[in-house]
Image: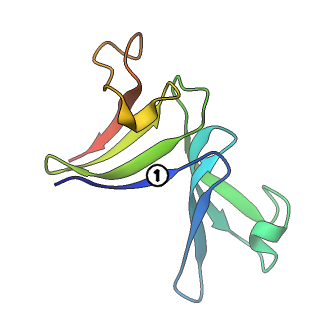
Amino acid sequence: MAQYQTYNDGQLIEYTDGVAIYRNGSLNKSFVLLKAITALGFAGIENIDWITLYALSMIGVLGVFRNGVRAGDFVLDEAITALAFDGVESSDGGVTGDWIKIYTFD
């Protein structure tokens, strides 16, 4: 059974060990991994108080992503129509379909 975390544009999940603070999710219609680098962290200014470690956006305009485990691999998917993950996976690079797998970690 697949298991996912879905991120709408502007939704970030925060992770901390009490020392470092990271966030990942959807920001400005890209899937991002951010790190706080000052005490102001995410209340501050990008590139001064926090940095973008990773950003990936493919073809969608919704900024809706999900990551999770499917068929034994960790995957990152992007919604490309309003049907999103309730629709059909694109098998032709996003020309048709409602969502597309944009990255697989195996």
Q: How is the image coloured?
A: rainbow
Vertical order, 95 against 46 (above or below)? above
Q: Nearer the viewer, residue 81 or 43?
A: 81
Which residue is denoted by mark 1 in the rendering?
6
Q: Position of residue 20 (x, y in %)?
A: 59, 79
Total residue callouts:
1
Q: Position of residue 4 (x, y in %)?
A: 34, 55
Q: Nearer the viewer, residue 31 or 1?
A: 1
The crowd level at tag 1 (other Cα within 10 Å; few <14, some 14-19, many 20+) is: some
Q: From the viewer's perspective, tell me whether residue 15 is left or right of residue 86.
A: right
Secondary structure of the residue carrying numbered label 1: strand
Vertical order, 33 against 42 (above or below)? above
Q: In the rendered image, which quarter contains the N terminus?
A: bottom left
For badge 1, the amino acid type reads Thr
The residue sitting at 33% across, 20% down in the picture is: 90
The residue sitting at 59% across, 48% down in the picture is: 26
Vertical order, 73 against 49 (above or below)? above
Vertical order, 21 against 72 (above or below)? below
- The answer to which quarter of the image holds residue 28 is top right
Q: Position of residue 80 (x, y in %)?
A: 49, 26
Q: Position of residue 7 (x, y in %)?
A: 53, 51
The residue sitting at 31% across, 45% down in the picture is: 75
- Residue extending farthest to the right is 45
Q: From the viewer's perspective, tell me whether residue 2 is left or right of residue 67.
A: left
